[in-house]
Structures are given as structure tokens and as C-alpha cells.
Image (spheres, rainbow, N blue to C red):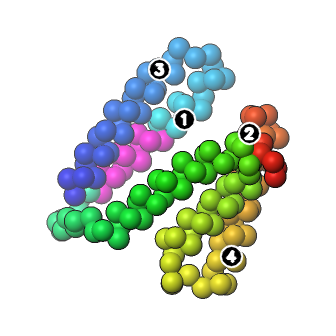
Amino acid sequence: MKSNLIVSAVFILLAFVFLFESRNLNYLSAIFPQIVSILLIALCTALMITTLKSKKQEKTQKLGKKDLLYIITVIVLSFLWVYLMDWVFGFTVGSIIFMTVISIVVGGKNLSFRQLLVNIISFAATALLFWYLLAKLLTVPLPRGLLF
């Protein structure tokens, strides 16, 4: 309960900093950070309100060794993804491979082949959508590796 309030307050302050800093940008450049900042403030305020309205206390759980291993694995894989995306895989292929590996790591033995296949298809659709939106519509240069 306290953690929700603290995280919400920190992100509201961060959003106000972004909102304040975006005033120095020209109109078109300031639209995106302002929208994201306002959305972040609204969502964090909603989280604070729902946390304060909730009557029951949440028990704090200690971080287990298995959870810590998952966190470290995801962090290492994220750095590896960023490094390999620029040199080998490129944005689209690297993102699909990264999300699939993370899905396998987190899903573990509970992940069926059918669910893995559905995940890969949805990851591919998401990566291709982001590639299209960023590279084609907004003409943002994305990392190009050997594969794509």
C-alpha cells in the first residue's frame, strides 16, 4: 500500500518535471511529452486514489531467490538485446527473439507449445507494428542489423 503511494508520488513529480521542461520545445515537438506527462499524472493520481480507498492492508512479501534470478535474467537479456539489435538482428527480428526468450524464461514449464506459438505471432505483430509506425510513418531511424 505504501509502495503504491510512494511510486505514484515519484512518477507524478517526474511527470511535472517533463511537463515543465517541454515548455521550451516548439509546438510540434512538445505535444508528445506533454500528452505522456498528463497521462502519467492522471494514471498515478488514479492509483493513489484507489490505494487510499482500499481498506485491506497488503502483506509485503520478501523477494525470493527465484524472483531475483528472473529479474537478473531479464536485465541481462535486455542489455544483450540492445547490444545485438544494433549489430546482428536489427530492431524487428531482435525484438521478436527477445520477447520470445523472455516469454520462455518467465513462462517456464507452464508454457505450452500452443501458447508459445500464439506469443510468437503476437510478438511479431507488435514488433512489425512498431517498425511500421516508427520507421515508415514517423521516419525514425531504427537499428538495422545483418538480418533486417
Q: Main secondary structure of the magenta part?
A: helix
Nearer-N-terminus badge (2/4)? 4
Determine which residue is flagged by label 3.
Answer: 21
Nearer-N-terminus badge (3/1)? 3
Image coordinates of residue 38 in percent, x first then y, are: 47, 36
Secondary element at image label 1: helix
**Residue extent of the magenta highlight:** 39-50
Which of labels 2 and 1 is toward the front? 2
Quadrant hosting residue 35:
top right
Any mark on residue 142, and which? 2
Q: Amino acid at mark 4?
A: Val
Q: Is residue 117 visible?
A: yes
Which of labels 2 and 3 is toward the front? 2
Contact (CB < 8 A) between labels 2 and 3? no
Any mark on residue 35, and which? 1
- Kindly identify the residue that appears in the image at 69 percent across and 70 percent down: 120
Q: Amino acid at mark 1?
A: Ile
Secondary element at image label 3: helix
Label 2, label 4: how many angstroms apart (C-alpha)? Answer: 26 Å
Label 4, label 3: how many angstroms apart (C-alpha)? Answer: 41 Å
Image coordinates of residue 97 in percent, x first then y, are: 67, 61
Any mark on residue 118, and which? 4
- Kindly identify the residue that appears in the image at 25 percent across and 48 percent down: 5
Secondary element at image label 2: loop
Residue 56 in the figure: left or right of residue 22: left
Give the crowd class for mark 1: few <14, some 14-19, many >=20 residues within 10 Å. Answer: few
